[in-house]
């Protein structure tokens, strides 16, 4: 088998692979340089630029619906709770989530960004927000060019910083990975971390952010590749968890994973069945928010024979 190009963000989970401490038996992985994974996801769904690529799950759902020849393996390399990813300007008159109705809410990057999808789903299912009564305003294009957003989505703020939109009052609130220390911008959901923990304990849903996708022609040509990748990522995970257990050289990101581990147990469960609740929830939210048109069976989204656990 020729060397396979693979695009992965560098994290505690992926470092053992990228640093060569763990290898994929039967496959030589050629890791491409990654400063930010988001542009590489876009290159993958638009041009199939890599053999294997880390992929935001909602981007993957859009790509699959558009007929892109890629398929996921049930390896979920980033995940988190998203109650803290909704914000409002303090002068917008927003007291409770329902107050978003009738307003413009900015979306960091595209409408189909996974964090935004999770936040909207939580606002609807837990706080009774009617998403159709909100004008959603993404600040960038969608990764999947063929995607067409619903009528209550406007791209008029494309290229504008989220903080500027909130501070100017052009957007009452925002969802997504919004990083600002402006005192005029506040979290929409009070005590967001504990709210996320309570939601997990109520629903059993531990949100998925990113998965790993492979070009279909490669999966057809190399039927053993799925097992090789599953084994490699499982070994990398064991290395990382051992590092966390030892408490060596822990970064803030590592500390965050330790915090997740205290709540959910395994911070990186692989496989379909251990993640069925999260998968069914993200698919349901995607259909409700008109990100995809139909509800695909969960098994249809993953490579045949993928049984990581």
Image (cartoon, rainbow, N blue to C red):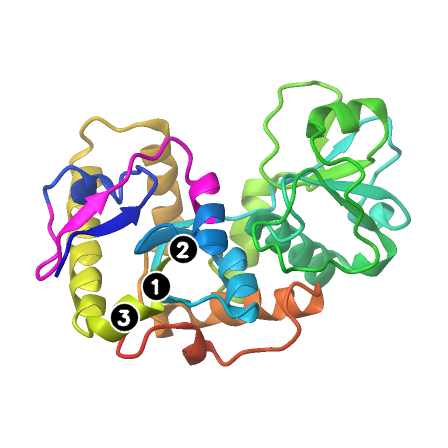
How crowded pointer 2 is (Cα within 10 Å; few <14, some 14-19, many 20+) is rated as: some
Q: Which residue is mark 1?
A: 215
Nearer-N-terminus badge (2/3): 2
Locate residue 188 relative to residue 229 in the image: left or right. right
Q: CA distance from mark 3 to mark 1?
A: 7 Å
Which residues make up the magenta segment? 22-41
Would you say the residues marked 1 and 2 are in contact, meaning their CB atoms lie under 8 Å apart? yes
Q: Which residue is mark 2?
A: 48
Front residue of this view, candidates 70 and 18: 70
Question: Where residue 22 sits in the image (x, y, percent)?
Answer: 11, 48
Q: What secondary structure is marked by label 3? A: helix
Q: Which residue is mark 3?
A: 219
Would you say the residues marked 3 and 1 are in contact, meaning their CB atoms lie under 8 Å apart? yes
Q: Name the disc covering residue 1, or none.
A: none
Question: Where residue 104 sits in the image (x, y, percent)?
Answer: 84, 42
Q: CA distance from mark 2 to mark 3?
A: 14 Å
Nearer-N-terminus badge (1/2): 2
Is residue 40 inside the magenta stretch?
A: yes
Q: What secondary structure is marked by label 2? A: loop
- Looking at the image, which residue is at 75% across and 21% down? 184
Q: What secondary structure is marked by label 1? A: strand
How crowded pointer 1 is (Cα within 10 Å; few <14, some 14-19, many 20+) is rated as: some
């Amino acid at each position: 088998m020729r060397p396979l190009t693979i695009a992965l963000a560098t994290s505690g989970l992926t470092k053992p692979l990228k640093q060569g401490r763990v290898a994929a038996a039967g496959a030589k992985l050629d890791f491409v340089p990654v400063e930010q994974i988001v542009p590489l996801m876009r290159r993958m769904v638009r041009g199939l630029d890599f053999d294997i690529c880390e992929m935001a799950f909602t981007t993957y759902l859009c790509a699959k619906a558009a007929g892109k020849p890629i398929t996921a393996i049930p390896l979920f390399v980033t995940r988190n709770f998203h109650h803290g990813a909704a914000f409002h300007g303090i002068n917008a008159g927003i007291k409770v989530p329902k107050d978003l109705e009738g307003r413009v809410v900015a979306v960091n990057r595209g409408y189909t960004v996974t964090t935004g999808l999770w936040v909207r789903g939580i606002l609807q299912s837990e706080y009774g927000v009617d998403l159709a009564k909100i004008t959603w305003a993404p600040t960038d294009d969608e990764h999947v060019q063929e995607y067409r957003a619903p009528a209550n989505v406007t791209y008029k703020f494309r290229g504008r910083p989220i903080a500027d939109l909130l501070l100017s009052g052009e957007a009452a609130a925002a969802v997504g990975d919004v990083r600002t220390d402006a005192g005029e911008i506040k979290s929409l959901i009070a005590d967001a971390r504990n709210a996320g923990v309570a939601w997990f304990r109520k629903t059993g849903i531990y949100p998925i952010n990113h998965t790993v996708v492979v070009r279909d022609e490669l999966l057809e040509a190399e039927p053993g590749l799925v097992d090789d990748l599953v084994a490699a990522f499982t070994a990398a995970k064991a290395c990382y968890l051992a590092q966390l257990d030892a408490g060596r050289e822990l970064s803030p990101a590592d500390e965050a994973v330790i915090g997740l581990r205290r709540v959910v147990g395994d911070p990186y469960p692989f496989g379909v069945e251990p993640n069925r609740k999260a998968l069914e929830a993200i698919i349901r939210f995607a259909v409700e928010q008109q990100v995809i048109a139909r509800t695909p069976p969960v098994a249809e989204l993953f490579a045949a024979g993928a049984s990581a656990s």
